Image: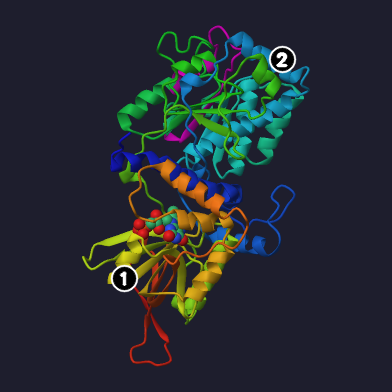
Amino acid sequence: MKLEPLTTIKKMLPLLTKYKAMILTHYSSFITHILSTSTPAASSPLHPSPKGFIGSILRRKFRGYCSNRGVMASSIKVVQNPDTISYLNQREAAEVDEILMGPLGFSVDQLMELAGLSVATAIAEVYNVKDYNRVLTICGPGNNGGDGLVAARHLYHFGYKPFVCYPKRTAKPLYTGLVTQLESLGIPFLSVDDLPINLSEDFNILVDAMFGFSFHGTPRPPFDDLIRRLVNLQNYNEINQKRSVIASIDIPSGWHVEEGDVVGDGIKPDMLVSLTAPKLCAKKFSGTHHFLGGRFVPPSIIDKFKLHLPPYPGTSMCVRIGKAPQVDISSMRENYISPELKEEDVEPDPYVQFQKWFDDALAAGLKEPNAMALCTAGKDGKPSSRMVLLKGFDKTGFVWYTNYGSRKAKDLSENANASLLFYWDGLNRQVRIEGSVQKVSEEESESYFHSRPRGSQIGAIASKQSSVIPGRDFLHQEYKDLETKYSDGAPIPKPTNWGGYRLKPDFFEFWQGQTSRLHDRLCYFPREADSTSSWKIKRLAP
Ligand SMILES: Cc1cc2nc3c(=O)[nH]c(=O)nc-3n(C[C@H](O)[C@H](O)[C@H](O)COP(=O)(O)O)c2cc1C
């Protein structure tokens, strides 16, 4: 298979999003809480703060560091082929619920809570809290309406500003309890008359929680009017290019559960969150974001209904089904929000400053904070970058290990000048380091080589780094042969063409992302003719 380089990069974009997401997923709920409160996050049973040293770092960091990517919008997006996924008809959907709430021991409250949480999570995955803050949830009298009420509560805790229109309230304790919970959060309940004719004037997201899979027939007042308004809203959006969106829970209200939008003049939601398993009408969904939520389906139901459902990633409550949204790369940008980086706050010694920032990156739990881009250029002057892992640093320089026959090694043998770049996403920080490079001593390389796992030692010998090889199998065969050769457990000799490099810096830049591209850049230059090797700090324009 031949892949064009650009095609390969495009294919890798979702993976990049996924990796960034993994970091933020860990902290997203914490960050969200911080964003959603104007006062500092207090520890409470509902919002326990992380404890101890890491906790204090996280509190310190994540109060200050975030980007307005949308907080939750960063989470993992997994795309599933819709053709391989099972869809339920109305009878099967009802049967699944009956089994869950019968022999399997679930209560309706539990299922509603998990459904509403899935919906809120899916919304937050796609629509960032800054640009899509005002959410109107339109709730019907049944379970679908209950899911909407729960979703509104979670969206509140995710930092959104929810409003609820619940014109036909159900008098059962489950529903009155949900209303009380929302009222206690100060979430406004709006009557149909309170709503503007054009819903997109006041709201960024309209959650359609009117009718679920058990509904049949024709919607009656006031839901017929509300559905009409959602349809009109789309026409209005098209004319005015206004960015208000509709998210339907399980079934777009007014659609036939199996046939979809039969007449063709119904709601066309931008997002559909199918619950438990998609219903047949979801095949007709043509919006951008189809998610599955309701991560509680046990294997017995999967087996009974022969369901093919996508696996949920990590701890996520929802998973994307269908096409990945088309991304306009030119519109992808972050607005960094971080504490200011002032001259008086940084250390006079850049090594100490680096240690501080490195410790912050560690404490924030970033993946491989020691990964750095190494840029070299040989005698032809053509620069070349690749990632390597920092394996140590002190006043003598920054060390990494590699193959002395590689392209970078060839470059460095011709031109010792090189640069290192660290980017710590999640902290909105980058560090640039420039200087000249020398090989570390053989003893240092020996000692590090033998500290590595045996597999890595064999791998280092097997790979003639940067040389062309006939295929994957070739490498694996080399590895196998070496594994056999060294199977007696005796020490593996370090190959002579493998070892470390040390870059001795003559320049550092500490970069802290800020709003409106007014980033902080503090640079360290060695003081000229100064035998004490002190540094002067200068600020550069961003
Ligand atoms: C996160 C990350 C860390 C890496 N660490 C190293 C490393 O420490 N040493 C190394 O030789 N290659 C490392 N690599 C692989 C290099 O990026 C590169 O593919 C390899 O060194 C060959 O580069 P060259 O042909 O320019 O010499 C790493 C790659 C990644 C993505």
- State the image coordinates of residue 129 (x, y, percent, origin top left): 50, 43
Q: CA distance from mark 1 to mark 2?
A: 72 Å
> Is residue 280 left or right of 528 when viewed as pictured?
right
Vertical arrangement, residue 256 with respect to residue 466, above or below: above
Q: Which residues are magenta?
A: 201-230
- State the image coordinates of residue 459 (x, y, percent, origin top left): 49, 54
Extreme-top residue of the structure? 217
User: Foreground residue, 516 or 89?
Assistant: 89
Looking at the picture, which amino acid does disc 2 mark? Glu
Q: In percent of the image, x 57 and y 33: which residue is there?
A: 318
Looking at the picture, which amino acid does disc 1 mark? Ser
Vertical arrangement, residue 365 with respect to residue 71, above or below: below
- Asked whether residue 225 is drawn in magenta, I would say yes
Comparing labels 1 and 2, the label whose residue is closer to the camera: 1
- Callout 1 crowding tier (Cα within 10 Å): few <14, some 14–19, many ≥20: some
Q: Which mark is residue 413?
A: 1
Residue 189 appears in the picture as rendered: no
- State the image coordinates of residue 138 (x, y, percent, origin top left): 55, 26
Point out the image quarter for the N terminus.
Answer: top left
- Asked whether residue 502 is drawn in magenta, I would say no
User: Foreground residue, 181 or 459?
Assistant: 459
Asked if ligand 1 lies within 8 A of label 2, the reply is: no
Extreme-left residue of the structure? 380
Q: Which mark is residue 98?
A: 2
| Res. 144 image quadrant | top right
Point out the image quarter for the C terminus.
Answer: bottom left
N-terminal label among 1 and 2: 2
Vertical arrangement, residue 529 with respect to residue 32, above or below: below
